[in-house]
Image: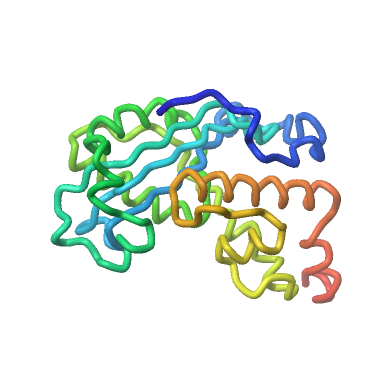
Amino acid sequence: MLLAQSDSDTTPVSALRQPLFAGLPPHLRTLAFIDLETTGLDASRHEVLEVAILRVDARSLKVLAEYEARVQPTRLADAQPEALAVCGYSDEEWRDALPLHEVLATVSPLLAGTLVAGHVPSFDWGFLTAGYRRTGLALPSVDYHRLDTASLAWPLLATGEVESLSLNALAKHFGIHRPTPHRAMADARCALEVARRLAVRMSRGGHMERLLEESGGVS
């Protein structure tokens, strides 16, 4: 379902100077936070089960549009049982799932012209790329960079503020509630919220300065 931004979007955006990133070049002014649930870890063998996209204004980190859908699997025999269990797959829950071709056709305009973002988005983008190839649809034109909240949060790990770079560890650190982990839209929203918290911290002079001070600076 494609929706405009809702007021329920949890946001510390008010803590950001508006717009926080006014100087961004035009081709980097829109982000697409993506998250997928899949039947396994190998994009060449496994399938997409669920897709969530948040199209976000990179200057304010506000959601412009969103889409989420469950996808009909066609090769459940190849699925990893643990992957199905993690995302809560069942025939009943997926009874109204859509064909992959239909989902990707809807996703394309949300992705077009964006910088793809998320928590380790290279994994999700690999499955999207494989899906577009299988369905014969054209891959949307996106920036070649990826915005990864795990990479952005690395200084927190380096300074001992978090024990890992997992989405769960970062959510816990920032006090972000995760009622339904391993659901595509919940995780996409969580990754966006982590990005917002990191942006607030960086805008105030945050963890990188501390890391450099403790390490004696850059030689």
User: Which quarter of the image is occupied by the N terminus?
Assistant: top left
Of all residues, the one furthest to the front in this rendering is 92
Up the image or down, 83 lies above or below 70; here it is below
Q: Height in image: 102 above or below 216?
A: above
Residue drawn 27% across the image and 61% down it? 42
Residue displayed at 39% across by 32% down: 141
**Relative height, residue 12 to residue 169 (above, below):** above
| Left or right side of 102 for 163 | right
Judged left or right of residue 78, residue 11 is right
Q: How many marks?
A: 0
**Which residue lies at the image location 73% right of the left edge and 75% below the top edge?**
160
Q: Position of residue 32 (x, y in %)?
A: 50, 37
Q: Which of these two is toward me, 189 or 22?
A: 189
- Is 26 placed above or below 211 here? above
Residue 172 picture location, percent across and down? 66, 63
Rendering coords of residue 6 (x, y %):
60, 28
Q: Choose top left, top right, bottom left or bottom right for residue 142.
A: top left
- Tell me the residue at 34%/51% (across/down): 126
Q: Residue 57 or 67: which is nearer the viewer?
A: 67
Closer-to-camera residue (207/40) = 40
Residue 108's x, y, as percent?
A: 36, 29
Give the image's coloring scheme: rainbow
Q: Quadrant of residue 15?
A: top right
Work out which quarter of the rendered image holds the C terminus and state it.
bottom right
Give the side of residue 197 with respect to residue 140, left or right. right
Describe residue 128's horizontal placement relative to residue 133 as left or right: right
